[in-house]
Structures are given as C-alpha cells and as structure tokens.
Amino acid sequence: MISTGLEGQGVVVTGAASGIGRATALKFAQEGAKVLVADLDRAGAEETVKEIEAAGGVALAVVGDLSAQQVADEVVERAVGAFGRLDVLVNNAGIMDRMSALGETDDAEWERVIRINLTAPFLLTRAVLPHMLAAGRGSIVFTASEAGLRGSAAGAAYTASKHGIVGLVKNLAVMYRGQGIRANAVAPGPTATNVRVDARQEAHGPTVIGQLIGANIGRRGSAEELAAAIVFLASDAASFVNGAVLPVDDGWVAV
C-alpha cells in the first residue's frame, strides 16, 4: 500500500471555513499534516482550527481577501514560519455566479467572480512557487468544477473562471514538472455545502441552465467525498498524476 506521505507536511487550504475546504483541512490533519486555514470568514476559520486542534492536530488561521496580494503573501509567510515548510497548496476558495448568460452579466458580477475564482488562486500559487521550487517538490490542487469541463453547468462568469483554472492547472503541470511540482484539480458535481446561487429565475441564463442540469446530474455529493479526492491528488499515492482534472460527480461528466 502506498503511503500518503503527508505526515508532518505543511499544507495551505483556502476556503476552509466551511464546506469542501473545511472537510479537506480536517482530512489533511487526520493524515498528520499541519494545516493553515485561509478564509474571509473569521469565525468559520477559527472553528476549523479548533476542530483540528481538538483532535490533536496542528493548525492556524489567516483571515483575509485572498485576491489581495498582501493577503496571499501573508498566508505563505505564516505557513512557512509556523511549519518550517510548505508542501501542499489547495486552492479551493470560490463563489458562484448568478447563472447569468453572457448578455445579462454585468461588470460587477464578472469582475467579482473572476477575481475570487481565478485571480486569487493565481496570486497565491505565484507566492507559493518559490518555496516549492527551493524544496524541489510540491503539490498544488485546485477546486475546478463541472463548469470547467462543459458550458451547461453555470453562468458565463463562473464557467469562464473554472475553464481558466483548468488551463492554469495544465500549464503549471507542464512548466514545473521538471522541478518536482505537480498540479491537479478536482471537478466537483453538485455538492452539499453552504454555497448558494442567487439566480434571477426569470433571466435567460438560469432558465436554460436549470433545464440542462436537472436532466443530467446524479446524486448530490458530500464535502467529505470531495476532500478525499483532493487529499489523494495531493499525496504520494498520486505521485505520477500531474495535469489531471478529476471529475468527482457521480458520473455527470459521462452523460
């Protein structure tokens, strides 16, 4: 049996105050990793840390907007300072759009979704890379989406942001595989979390998407099922997996 190799490693998980991020942080801690919990939600992030510490693990929280370079830099500095190393980055934080079609997407919706879903992971990954390059190894896992694989799972902004994540993963994998760094992603289907969609039901986008999603999805997944896939991709058990986008969706991608 291949070991996960995560014992004692330094891990950053974004969006870890709740949902998939919290489940992922807890799973890494169960594997013996030291976890930095990054989120905008202070109370939720601190609760995740308390859960890890109560189980005998090591964790700390950094609260802030990850689309700001200074926050991304703080996350990396705090992780390296506390753990002495930074082995794994999980770019999980993200938001939904309003299922808006392109013609009804205003500037505010577009800019907010792209900033949080694509720019923030770019900034944090850029800040992490020098430490992984110096160590000669590292694993970066992104939470993409079914919307990164198809055009029928979300609105224009979210779909563009997640297609961007898929491209970023593949480019990272090619650019840095010679330096021992792997980049992969999970593409979740519908998952039971606290993420809500503020869709305008009378709008064109939600009308079209609602019909397509309702006809094709399977069951709703759990945050723990997504966490298991993320931890696998980050671990030594996936040491030959690089540039992959793994659907975790009860077969939705196969329809």
Image (cartoon, rainbow, N blue to C red):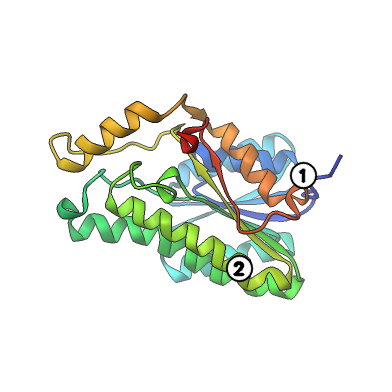
The residue under the point 80% across, 50% down is: 5
253 or 82, which is in the foreground?
Answer: 253
In the image: residue 137, left or right of residue 251:
right
Q: Say which of 110 and 64 sits in front.
A: 110
Compared with 197, 218 (above or below) is above
Seen at 33% across and 55% down, the residue is: 113
Q: Amino acid at mark 2?
A: Val
**152 to the left or right of 191:** left
Q: CA distance from mark 1 to mark 2?
A: 21 Å
Q: Secondary structure at mark 1?
A: loop
Percent position of residue 166, x then y:
49, 57
Residue 31 x %, y %:
75, 41
Which residue is under mark 2?
128
How many residues crowd around disc 1 within 10 Å: few (fewer than 14), some, or many (20 or more)?
A: some
- Indicate which disc residue 32 carries: 1
Residue 112 shows which numbered tag?
Answer: none
Q: Quadrant of the C terminus?
A: top left
Q: Amino acid at mark 1?
A: Gly
Q: Position of residue 16 (x, y in %)?
A: 53, 45
Residue at 54% x, 33% y is 223
- Residue 77 seen in this snapshot: no
Q: Say which residue appears at 51% left-offset and 29% top-offset.
A: 221
What residue occupies the far front of the structure in this picture?
A: 255
Is residue 58 left or right of 216 when viewed as pictured? right
